Amino acid sequence: MGTGAGPGAPSVADEVSAFREGLARVDVGALSDAERVELVAELERVKGAASAAQARTMHPLRTSLEAASVRGSTAGRGGSGLDGGEGRLGVAEPGAADPRVGLEPTTAQEPRCT
């Protein structure tokens, strides 16, 4: 998964991982109450942005996996035709925010007019 920045550039996932690791190193004990309030507000915005990015990512991923599954069964392989990496998507790391993350449908699709 690339950023489009060229060969050797960190992937988007690498950048997000580095950001997450940086958050774990924040010394909240060294912050004033005003700084803590600012940090909590910014972290709330980060949570919203992360949820939105996840939804935008999961919809095309799910579509791609379904298409690969159809191609795989059409080719007689009976599987998704992928290397098996999709099985890790629903597994949360220790300390992950939400262990319910998986391939369930998201609201990233265009809203339906009813």
Image (spheres, rainbow, N blue to C red):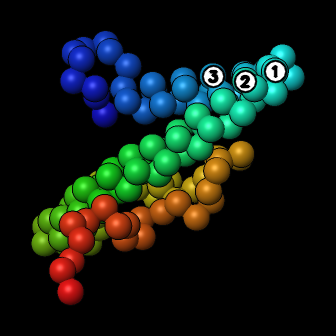
**Residue 37 vertical placement versus 114 (above, below):** above
For numbered disc 3, what is the local secondary structure?
helix
> Which image quadrant: the N terminus?
top left
| Residue 72 falls left or right of residue 54 | left
Q: Nearer the viewer, residue 86 or 104?
A: 104
Mark number displayed over residue 53? none
**Earlier along the polypeptide chain: callout 3 or callout 1?**
3
Q: Residue furthest bottom?
A: 114
Q: Which residue is mark 3?
A: 22
**Residue for point 58% across, 64% down:** 100
For numbered disc 2, what is the local secondary structure?
helix
Q: Nearer the viewer, mark 3 or mark 1?
A: 1
Residue 84 visible in image: no
Residue 8 visible in image: yes
Q: Nearer the viewer, residue 75 or 33?
A: 33
Q: Position of residue 61 (x, y in %)?
A: 29, 55
Q: Position of residue 110 (x, y in %)?
A: 21, 66
Amino acid found under the numbered disc labelled 1? Ser
Circle 3 residues within 10 Å: few <14, some 14–19, many ≥20? few
Amino acid found under the numbered disc labelled 2? Glu
Q: Position of residue 30 (x, y in %)?
A: 84, 17
Mark number displayed over residue 35? 2
Q: Residue furthest front?
A: 34
Quadrant of the rendered image containing residue 71 = bottom left
Q: Position of residue 107 (x, y in %)?
A: 35, 67
> Which image quadrant: the C terminus?
bottom left
**Residue 29 vertical placement versus 109 (above, below):** above
Q: Nearer the viewer, mark 2 or mark 3?
A: 2
Q: Which residue is mark 1?
A: 32
Q: Find the distance from the CA under tag 3 to the CA under tag 1.
A: 19 Å
| Residue 84 falls left or right of residue 29 | left
Q: Find the distance from the CA under tag 2 to the CA under tag 3.
A: 17 Å
